[in-house]
Image (spheres, grey):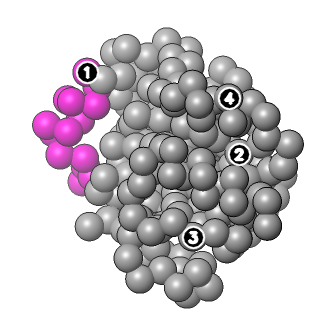
Amino acid sequence: MAILPTNVRQQVEEMFSSLDADVKMILVDEGGASELDDLLREIEELSPKLAYERRSAAEAAALGVAEESVPSILLDGPAGVSRARFAGAPAGHEFGVLVQDIIDLSRGDIDLSDATKSYLDGLEQDVHLQVFTTAT
Amino acid sequence: MRLAHQMAMYSPHVVAEMVDANEFWDLTRKHSVRGVPKTVINDGKRYVEGAVPEANLVQQIRSALTD
């Protein structure tokens, strides 16, 4: 049974018509039946520029994913595997973030103020942001 | 949320994870997450509750790095 309602599929498909470079979604998890796997397969069908690959939890460290963050979704775009990730299901509002991330990576769009870009350009230390969300 | 991800896409020094609080109980407990969104900077150096404007998040990152 499809996870995404028909109207959402149509809407996302239309948004993905603006994709430029190819983007690959990578699911790092323990394997077996998973709603996340089903969801990403459905999303992959919505654009010929999208690909999907499933990797085992044993490969997490090699992909830069902490063991405590499995299952995770990574996005591999024109600049390599993105540092913008999803730990767990991108449900509710976060589904929209996943769709927008795919578009941003594919098109190279960055929507940040000049002041923020300038601050980030000067960063010499690493920053790890974890944004906790829920499906509701 | 998109803000954190945009920062990670822009800077090679930034990693940004969206964490499903319902799935990652250990992390949720560790950082005392009671409301969402809640942003944790560098494993708890700073916490940001709610959705905040871009400049505020930058300010909190700045503070976390100068401790």
| Residue at which label 3 appears | B47
The chain letter for the residue carrying disc 1 is A
Give the mark toward the camera: 1 or 4: 4
A74 relative to A90, above or below:
above
| Residue at which label 2 appears | B14
Q: Which mark is residue A118?
A: 4
| Gap in angstroms between the C-alphas marked 3 and 4 | 23 Å
| Gap in angstroms between the C-alphas marked 2 and 4 | 14 Å
Residue beneath the point at 39% across and 64% down: B50
Residue A125: percent from left, percent from top: 84, 49
Q: Which residues are magenta?
A: A1-14
Query: Would you identify the image quadrant in which residue B44 lies?
Result: bottom right
Residue beneath the point at 59% across and 31% down: A115
Which amino acid lies under the numbered mark 3 shown in the image of this protein?
Tyr
Give the mark toward the camera: 2 or 4: 4
| Gap in angstroms between the C-alphas marked 1 and 4 | 34 Å
Q: Secondary structure at mark 4?
A: helix
Q: Is residue A133 magenta?
A: no
Residue A34: percent from left, percent from top: 46, 63
A36 relative to A69, above or below:
above
Q: Which mark is residue A14?
A: 1
| Gap in angstroms between the C-alphas marked 1 and 3 | 37 Å
Q: Which badge, 3 or 2, is on the more N-terminal residue?
A: 2
Give the mark toward the camera: 3 or 4: 4
| Gap in angstroms between the C-alphas marked 3 and 2 | 16 Å
Same chain letter for marks 3 and 4:
no
Q: Is residue A3 magenta?
A: yes
Residue B22: percent from left, percent from top: 42, 76
